[in-house]
Amino acid sequence: MTGITEQTAILAKYFDLNQNGKVLAEYVWVDADGHTRSKCKTLSKRPSSAEDLPEWNFDGSSTGQAPGHDSDIYLRPVAFYPDPFRKGDNIIVLCECWNNDGTPNKFNHRHECAKLMSAHADEQVWFGLEQEYTLFDQYDNVYAWPKGGFPAPQGPYYCGVGTGKVYARDVVEAHYRACLHAGINISGINAEVMPSQWEFQVGPCSGIEMGDQLWMARFLLERVAEEFGVKISFHPKPLAGDWNGAGCHTNVSTKNMREVGGMKYIEDALAKLAKRHKEHLVLYGADNDMRLTGRHETASMEAFSSGVANRGASVRIPRSVAKEGYGYFEDRRPASNIDPYLVTGIMVETICGAIPDADMYKEYARESE
């Protein structure tokens, strides 16, 4: 990989042109298939809050979110971030999707999640998500793998350094800086066990902000990769065989868990999670059964398990947490292609309690019909 493309270099010379006080706002939303979409709007000035941003709309029949005879879906801004591509006062706007009758679109999982987060704000739930992903070339081959063959077995690639061990570091570094510029709380990166597989971590974030920031970090990743001619896959088992899958391990803590004596609250949470194992798996990503086999650092889907420093368990308690007696736990079941609103929502619902007007599992089951 040589860096930015020639076309991008040509385009860059136009970025210094005077925008005459106008602000470019890239509106981003999640479509029916769990991918981000976007389009740009010109504003007369930079907003001071999401409430200052105008509502917009798009053709939902082209994104799987509405029928052709009634296709307008409305974009309601919920957060915005500095644009690392256009720079200046330009922004990227995260939006919820709403129907024209005033109801949230059936693929808008943020709305229900936000209710739960607001109802349990006193619990001060913190999340940290570990987003794994795999890079492919434009012909859908795993990036930099031998044509018609395979690299050496897994072993030297995890947190590797050097030619033949690490691939596409320039894409990863560019994404890292794009996230930092946008104000995403990206806390780290590392090369993963399968070659051409990487991970970035976002968090700690509280409440609804966790889902917002992960979706924006994903958008930035695909937008960066576009400039390098690389494809990003969030599939939990991108390649069959003796290769690790890709997950989105979910680290969780409440205020009580983070204080001295917090292990009791962690154990209480694990007992609650065990009772809703199947309900959680329904929301933990498509094709996750291909990944949760009991091999390649995963637990089996069949039964809930937990253990200290055990990467083969459903939930891992870090060794340092067990030693100190307080901290957080890591749910290792979520797949790399999760909707973070569903996962963080049902997590709060399970460990903190249901509320009358929101049920993440039932809502998702209804919307999937």
Image: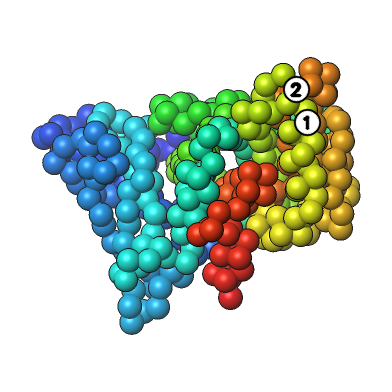
Quarter containing the N terminus: top right
Q: Quadrant of residue 255?
A: top right
Q: Secondary structure at mark 2?
A: loop
> Label 1 to label 2, Cα distance in Å?
6 Å
Residue at 85% x, 30% y is 309
As drawn, is 344 to the left or to the right of 303? left
Residue at 36% x, 46% y is 78
Q: Answer above or below: position of 244 versus 369.
A: above
Q: 329 or 67: which is nearer to us?
A: 329
Q: Secondary structure at mark 1?
A: helix
Residue at 34% x, 74% y is 71
Residue 359 image offset from top left, x and y in percent: 58, 59
Q: Amino acid at mark 2?
A: Gly
Q: 64 or 165: which is nearer to us?
A: 64
Q: Answer above or below: position of 255 versus 197.
A: above
Q: Which mark identifies residue 261?
A: 2
Quarter containing the C terminus: bottom right
Residue 52 image offset from top left, x and y in percent: 22, 42
Q: Amino acid at mark 1?
A: Lys
Q: Which residue is mark 1?
A: 264
Q: Which mark identifies residue 177?
A: none
Badge 2: residue crowd in 10 Å (few <14, some 14–19, many ≥20): some
